[in-house]
Amino acid sequence: MVHAIRIHEHGGVDKMVWEPVEVAAPGQGQIRVKHRAVGFNYIDTYFRSGLYKVPSLPAVLGTEGAGDVVAIGPNVVDFKVGDRVAYANPMGSYVEERLMPADRAVRVPDNINYETAAAMMLQGMTVRYLLRQTYKVGPGTVMLLHAAAGGIGLIACQWAKHLGATIIGTVGSEEKGKLAKEHGATHIINYAKENFVERVSEITGGKKCDVVYDGVGKDTFPGSLDCLKPRGLWVSFGNASGPVPPLDIGILNTKGSLFATRPTLFTYTATREDLVESANDLFDMVGRGIVKIQVNHKYALKDAAQCHRDVEGRKTTGSAILIP
């Protein structure tokens, strides 16, 4: 018997319950993982609230973790007991130990610790596909990055700077602006004091941006579209302020033949090959010190509700993790 954070119905943080659960022996193609650290991601709040539906209730929250393989099922060839592993899918990480499909886990290099691994898999691989696949960022790219001091934001600032981009980051406070600057943002816009659409135009001399990375959602729409050059790309990858309203596709025409996409990591890492390539690229960037993972907040796993409160209240920066 182990303990987990589960929900029995969707709603607020009061629906999160710390309770005992049974974990069976691993079946065909499965491994059992003892967590050393569990990652928090904003998507966890969507599954808790019901914005995204869980497959069934009750459900263990969380999509990311790192730990040790303590048992393997039949036909598992990539791992052995004692291996250090991490993952960013499937759901069910807010638990002391869990079963998971072996083909969704990756081996963690010796130079990366459990807490870093747990904090970076979903966010880091998200940044990787955003910058390298959804839009290929390089020297000369001018990009707008909303929530530049968040977990994804700080990783994206470092990675995009390495790729040679000009990064315009939005933040909600002076403190967050300083943090984003320290991690590579070229320009900072404090949306609590400034109109980000007007400031983007000023910063770029009216030329605007090649791409906008928008994990905020409702509060930054449709302003994000007004920050794009003709034929620019709006990448909506999150809804931290609430879902984007229904979109009249004609608006993309009137604002300059714009492109829009709503990607997800799970599509970009759907195959084993894509997952391993993405994870290894991330491990390389972190291992070489190009990207540093900012774990600014740690909570006991049983106190996951407080983590949700703090992040939803915009009291955090960088990454947050849960310790079993």
Image: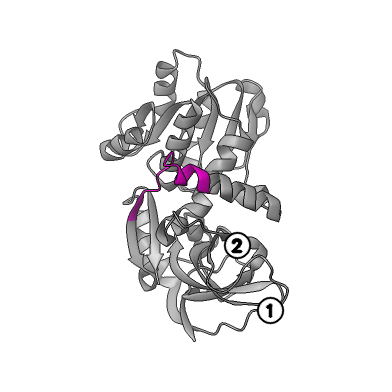
Q: Could you tell me which quadrant the C terminus lies in?
A: bottom left
What residue is rendered at 61% in x and 73% in y?
A: 31
Q: Earlier in the sequence, mark 2 or mark 1?
A: 1
* Mark 2 crowd level (few <14, some 14–19, many ≥20, 10 Å Cα): many
In the picture of the structure, the residue carrying the numbered disc 2 is: 105
What residue is rendered at 47% in x and 31% in y?
A: 162
Please tell me which residue lies in front, 285 or 236. 285
Q: Position of residue 274 (x, y in %)?
A: 67, 49
Q: Which mark is residue 313?
A: none
- Considering every residue shown, the one lying at the far left of the view is 175
In the picture of the structure, the residue carrying the numbered disc 1 is: 27
> Is residue 243 visible from the viewing direction of this image?
no
In-image side of 54 versus 48 (left or right): right
On the image, which quarter does residue 254 sit in? top right
* Mark 1 crowd level (few <14, some 14–19, many ≥20, 10 Å Cα): some
Q: Position of residue 197 (x, y in %)?
A: 44, 25
- Disc 1 marks a residue whose amino acid type is Gly
- Disc 2 marks a residue whose amino acid type is Ala
**Residue range (magenta):** 283-296
Q: Position of residue 176 (x, y in %)?
A: 31, 40
Tell me how the rendering is colored: one colour
Q: Secondary structure at mark 1?
A: loop
Q: Is residue 102 above or below residue 253?
A: below
